[in-house]
Image (cartoon, grey):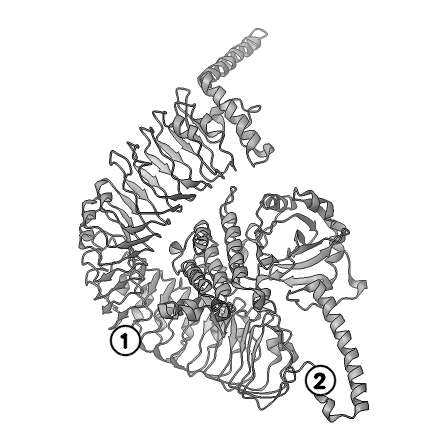
Amino acid sequence: MRRYVPTTCLFFFFLFFFFFFFQLVVSELPSNQRNTMIRLYELLHNNTNTAQSSFPWNLTRDPNPCSWKGVNCSSNNSITQISLPLFSLSFSDFLPVICQIETLEAIDLSNNHLSYIPSGFLTDCGKIRGLKGLNFSRNRLSGPLPNFYGFAKLEFLDLSYNSLSERIDLQLDGLIGLKRLNLGYNQFSGSVPTHLGKSMVLEDLGLSANLFQGKIPEEIANYSNLVSIDLSANKLSGSIPHRFNELSKLKNFILSDNSLSDEIPQFLSSFQNLRRFAANQNSFSGAIPPGITNHLGNLDLSYNNLSGSIPETLLSQSNLHTLDLSSNSLVGSIPSDMSPNLVRLRLGNNRLNGTIPYSSLVSLQKLTYLELDNNSLTGSIPHELGFCKSLALLNLAKNNLTGFLPVQLANLSNLQELKLQANNLVGEIPTQITQLQGLRELNISWNSLNGSIPSSISRLQYLTNLDLRCNNLSGPIPDSIGSLSSLLELQLGENKLNGKIQSMPENLQIALNLSSNLFEGPIPQTLSKLTGLEVLDLSNNRFSGKIPDFLVQMASLTELALSNNLLFGEIPKFRSYVNVETSGNEGLINTTQSSSPPAFHRKRMTVSVGIVFAVAAASVLVVVIVTVVALSFSKRFYRISDERIRSEEELSQPQVIKGNLLTANAIHRSNIDFSKAMEAVIHPSNVILNTRFSTYYKAIMPSGISYFVKKLNWSDKIFQLGTHEKFGEQLEVLGKLNNSNVMTPLAYVLTLDSAYLFYEFAQKGTLFDVLHGSLGEALDWASRYSIAIGVAQGLAFLHGCASGPVLLLDLSSKSILLKTLREPQVGDIELCKVIDLTKSTGSLSAVAGSVGYIPPEYAYTMRVTMSGNVYSFGVILLELLTGKPVVSQGTELAKWVFSNSAKQDRLDHILDFSISRTSLAVRSQMLAVLRVALACISISPEARPKSKSIMRMLLNTR
């Protein structure tokens, strides 16, 4: 036993030594490659924007480069791939060093901040015989496309999402083996390039979102191996070249968002491999080619000028999943034979007639979106629709449908949007409809429905929009409607409703419309709880008594319609941005038109009485002016939410758990005083802005510098702050962002029940308050354009962050603050980082965004996206262009603009005339920006431009 133990230990020692030595030998790189990697490590370690402590490579801890992140090695000890995405690389000096590794097969430098590719890289890497892949996408490359000489075996080249420009001529002609090329989302101009590699082996061509113009060159057909072509979002015109009938291998053919015309070629029907053809948003005319869906899975021809009828077999092919023919001039009936595999069918905004075919509906178990709106369909709504169990959106609005609402619609348990407005439906609202507990939007307005509103409507707890106006509904509003906690818009106007208004959903924001009914008596006190409401319409009823003061206190109100009632007494003074309609009330007295009563009354007074009155009035006026000035100094241009004034004895300073400075700016670090800030947040007088998730305070530091201190509502259950450490880590990332158009946190303080974030103070307030308030007239076109450019720049920066895109939960004119009238800053960037949307009891559209800025797809996608942010930005552009609020008289600005933009001769009517009339140059630029805005608010998220492209599009309007 005494000899056995040491022998065993000795055996394991030699075994361990053998494996260690073997691994060391096997993993040992050639000395030249190891030296190259050490040099590369030193260059990157010392020059990246990433903190050195978090740099993913560590030569000391891990001396073997093959185990470093982004480095792949072959079995024979050679480096085959360098992949460095999201490394925050902004300098390019290291690039030629990479080319010294002669065994490289792929280089991935995407999602960095590189501004140019050195000539040494192109020369040296062009000599690497086995290099097959090169990816510089999502950087900041500018200037013309580099010349790629050499690169004998390069198969994949991706330079998309940069700012490369000018024409493409022979820069790619030397590439012999190029199979996949992506140059999308740049600023290339001129004609579509045709020299794309001498060997003609190209398979995948991506040239989308550039400035290419002219016709599609038929020479592209020389690349007979092409499987995918994407020429979308350019300025191409003319027709699809006939020679493209030689491209029989095509699987994806994308031509969306151009100015192409003529007919859709018949030869596409013979392409057996074609799976997706998208030619939407062009000017194609003529009939739809028969048989075009013989092999297609996805066909999008929406927003063109197609005419004729829908081919009888177009919808019947089993391979067809998505078909969009909306917004054309198609006539005739809808084919009755439909594929059971259909997922999305959009035929709205055409001239279709006849009845909705019911024979195939039973088999459409996968159908999720059905849109047949704005046609001339007749007959009743087929009860067979109840078999389409996957339906999330059913839109049959604006037709000539008759009959009753089928109770079988209650079987659509996945339904989220039901739009049946502007038809000729009769009968009562079936109570079975209230079983659709996932419903977000219900619109059955402009019909001939009668009876009462079902009290069981309270089951629809996810409902955000309810529109029942313009029917023959009678009786009282059910008390249970007040329990619809997610409801943002309630339209009940033009019915025969009466009785007492007991309660209303307190979260209403868009509009409450009770106009043209039979309500009487005083305006109900229950409306005072609607503190977030923007539009209130009580017109054309028999409301009596005085206009209550609580209406003046509703800080979010922008439209108030009280006309044609029996109201009397003085009209209270509302905020300047509130549009109040009071005509048709004979007993109302408007006393707000004159601001100088002493001068007005002097003629009817004796001199002595006049003097006494004038002195008294002057004294009051001085007090008022002093008070207004004092308030204006601390709450300038901001909406002040009413709060209960507490006595000094009740105020207690929050108990600070942790305070941390995020900014590296020495001025801010020396000025920010956490103790002084905590003193400021306990005084309601320092509140300058309230939002759903936060309260903004103004805090004046001992140095005299003012800062925003934003209190997050930590108690809200949808906040996912987790531990203090986790929250701090999230803010550390945001604090490192550096962009003049983004409000980045400078510091934060954590208390037991709240979190406080520090920001630079914006003197002018929110864009909303400036644009729609007293300073609106000061915003000339130059200021509005500068704001548009600044917000676009901020959005592009956030979406292109090296650590991953920063998405905005609430992008609106109320979340953009102005340092000056030309310097905007995008705020609330932290919300998506600290809010857990899955913990919200309402729909996403009830949480994500402000009313009027929410993209339509949020109702059913349930996730915040970059394209959703682009939609919100498009609405902000419309505000700047029109000067109108985002919701007016219950109509969203985006919908109003979109409906008026269909006719080119009405575009001028969309613009703010006080601005567009100043000069022809201003008008021309505003029209150009309007086209950008329309692209941003496209119904299809895929059709919206990326934030980086928007910046380029806006700059091109100069």
* Location of residue 479 with respect to 915 vertically, above or below: below
Q: Nearer the viewer, residue 948 or 380?
A: 948
Residue located beneath label 1 in the image: 378
> Is residue 436 among what the camera can see?
no
**Residue 41 pos. (x, y %):** 52, 26
* Location of residue 221 with respect to 422 vertically, above or below: above
**Residue 536 pos. (x, y %):** 54, 76
**Label 1 secondary element:** loop
**Residue 293 pos. (x, y %):** 22, 55
> Is residue 494 among what the camera can see?
yes
**For residue 752, side relative to residue 147 (left or right):** right
* Location of residue 610 with respect to 903 vertically, above or below: below
Alpha carbons under labels 1 and 2: distance apart: 63 Å
> Residue 425, located in which quarter of the rendered image?
bottom left
Residue located beneath label 2 in the image: 597
Q: Quadrant of the C terminus?
A: bottom left
Residue 472 numbered tag: none
Task: Give the amino acid at mark 1.
Answer: Thr
**For residue 565, side relative to residue 163 (left or right):** right
